[in-house]
Amino acid sequence: MMKAFQRAIRRAGLEAEYSQGFNPQMQMIFGAPLSLGFTSEAEYADFSFVKEYEPKYIIEKLNEVLPDGLKILDAGERKTNKNIMADIMYAEYEFEISSVIGIDIAEKLMAEENVFVDKFRKGRKKTVDVRPLIHFVEYKDGKLKVLVSAGNVVNLNPRLLVDAIKLNLDISAEAKSFNRTAQFVNREGQMVSPLETLALETK
């Protein structure tokens, strides 16, 4: 993904800022990483340029040269101290799920005081409570929409959430077609889009 944008920026003739050092790298940072096999319609990235460009100009120039399937939808000038990866706090996902308890799966999940699941890292198993990381759940037409914590400090992968559902509510539950539909930052206690004025300008 980074190489695709590096090439697009060069082809578009935009003057990117580079890191200093023996092997200079184009300055760009993407938001919360997207898991392998997931689709998304809500990705964010920071790009640094040595010249000042109007956001609309950047959108136009990049969309002229980006490969099929990649498109800039919106842009803004960030005046915050955090980069986008450190700024993202929440993510919304939607995915298909089969469950014997059906529509009650959302209500039961939100009603649970604790939702434990085994998490494996570097060959070690750790049982964690992911309930504090689940902020909203909705079930409709065989799909589950969830709002969960995301980012560098705390992050709940939807696949791990499905494991938690199987362990705590319905052992038969199976999920597929994971799609990230939104990402949010926290500003003054509010959950807002990274491209809202409050998110762009609040330091």
Image (tube, helix red, strand yellow):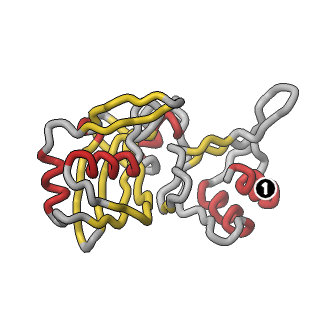
- Disc 1 crowd rating (10 Å Cα; few below 14, some 14-19, many 20+) is few
Q: In the rendering, at what x and y percent does residue 40 appear?
A: 49, 60
In the image: residue 47, left or right of residue 87: right
The x and y percentages for residue 30 are: 59, 45
What's the residue at 83%, 25% (across, down)?
A: 21
| Image position of 165 (left or right of 29) | left
Q: Work out whether residue 29 can be spotted.
A: yes
Query: Residue 111 versus residue 151: which sits nearer the camera?
Result: 111
Give the number of marks.
1
Q: Residue at x 75, y 58 (%)?
A: 8
Which residue shows up at 47% across the image and 42% down it? 200
Q: Relative to 146, does residue 90 appear above or below in the rendering?
A: above
Residue 4 occupies quadrant? bottom right
Residue shown at the point (14%, 52%) measured from the top left: 108
Residue 84 in the image: x percent, y percent? 52, 40
Element at label 1: helix
The x and y percentages for residue 54 are: 63, 54
Q: Which residue is mark 1?
A: 7
Residue placed furthest toward the top: 21
Three-letter amino acid code of the residue under disc 1: Arg
Q: Which residue is farthest right? A: 22
- Would residue 196 be seen by someone viewing this image from the given angle? no
Q: Nearer the viewer, residue 43 or 64?
A: 43
Is 117 above or below relative to 144? above
The quarter of the picture where the C terminus appears is top left
**Relative to 103, 1 lies left or right:** right
Q: Is residue 123 left or right of residue 147?
A: right
Place residue 47 in its image quadrant: top right
